[in-house]
Image (cartoon, rainbow, N blue to C red):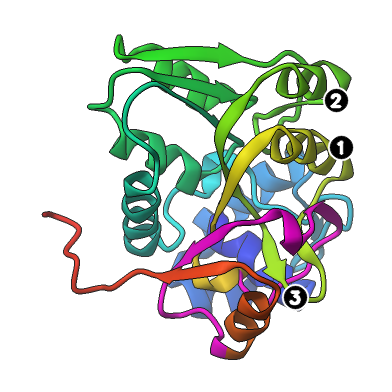
Amino acid sequence: MRQILSVLHTEQSVSLEALVVRLGSSKATLRRDLAELDEQGLLVRTHGGARANESSAEIPARLRDSQARDAKILIARTAAQMIPTGPHALAVNGGTTTHDVLRALHYRTGLTVITNALTIATDCAANPRFNVIMTGGKVRSSSLEAVGPLAEATFRSMNIGTAVLGTDGISAEGGVTTHDDTEARTNNAMVNAAKRVIVVADGSKVGEVTLAKMADLTQIDDLVTDPSADPTALDQIAQAGVRIHVVSYKNTIGS
């Protein structure tokens, strides 16, 4: 289903026969997947295929975990090493890479995790070493993040040492962006409350601009990405004063 949504994100419409060829799945399997995605409002079924649903540009959180997994784990490990030792307030928004940052910090003591992401809060709450603060707010079904005035007020009331920000796009042109404007405002409150902001983004997000701005590049201290990122886009981001960290694939995932 993630692959179907990725195809529609770039091509807007696709036939069932084309999906069979591209994805190697049977027509019966694809028809079931299309029916489920249509029921969830993530695409619109058509005669012989499907087209993109303009109101749902983002891939839901539950379908994102397999995207660029090796790169995201290396990015997360690098970002985790940048978190100061000792007692520290760490804020994170939702996303598979930010979630992986906290998994890489599972051994840490004295860490207070402040998040508006339900999946991250639930996972971190099971770790007795973490002190977890969950914001209030309205929960978005696609990202499983709490957004709106309650979430923004929670972030504004905190003295955050480091914010780790996942994103749908980062560029010199658009800053740090996401698909939803309400989510962007909530994440901007997190950014404004933090002394240091680290953006974690695999190479596919670098140079991309999506609907709503979460932060200007002047608010970002570091970007951690992978070698697939566009070098020209990275140079432009660096010129705005952001420190660029490109992970090395020599660091094996199993180490």
Q: Earlier in the sequence, mark 2 or mark 1?
A: 2
Measure the C-alpha gap from mark 3 to mark 1.
22 Å
192 magenta-colored: no
- Quadrant of the rendered structure where residue 162 is? top right
| Quadrant the C terminus occupies | bottom left
Q: Where is residue 121 in the image (x, y as percent from the top left)?
A: 51, 20
Give residue 182's mark. Answer: 1
Badge 2 amino acid: Gly
Q: Dot 2: what SS?
A: loop
Taking depth in this image into account, of 162 and 173 the one nearest to the observer is 162
Question: Relative to 161, is 13 above or below?
Answer: below
- Mark 2 — residue? 148
User: Which residue is rendered at x = 59% and y = 25% of the image?
Assistant: 115
| Quadrant the N terminus occupies | bottom right
Q: Which of marks 3 and 1 is nearer the N terminus?
A: 3
Q: Can residue 24 be seen in this view?
A: yes
Which stretch is magenta?
206-231
Q: In this view, does 73 lie to the left or right of 217?
A: left
Q: Are marks 2 and 1 in contact (CB under 8 Å)?
A: yes
- Mark 3 — residue? 172
Q: Can residue 138 be seen in this view?
A: no
Q: Badge 3: few (under 14), some or many (20 or more) residues near its Cα, within 10 Å?
A: many
Q: Which of marks 2 and 3 is nearer the N terminus?
A: 2
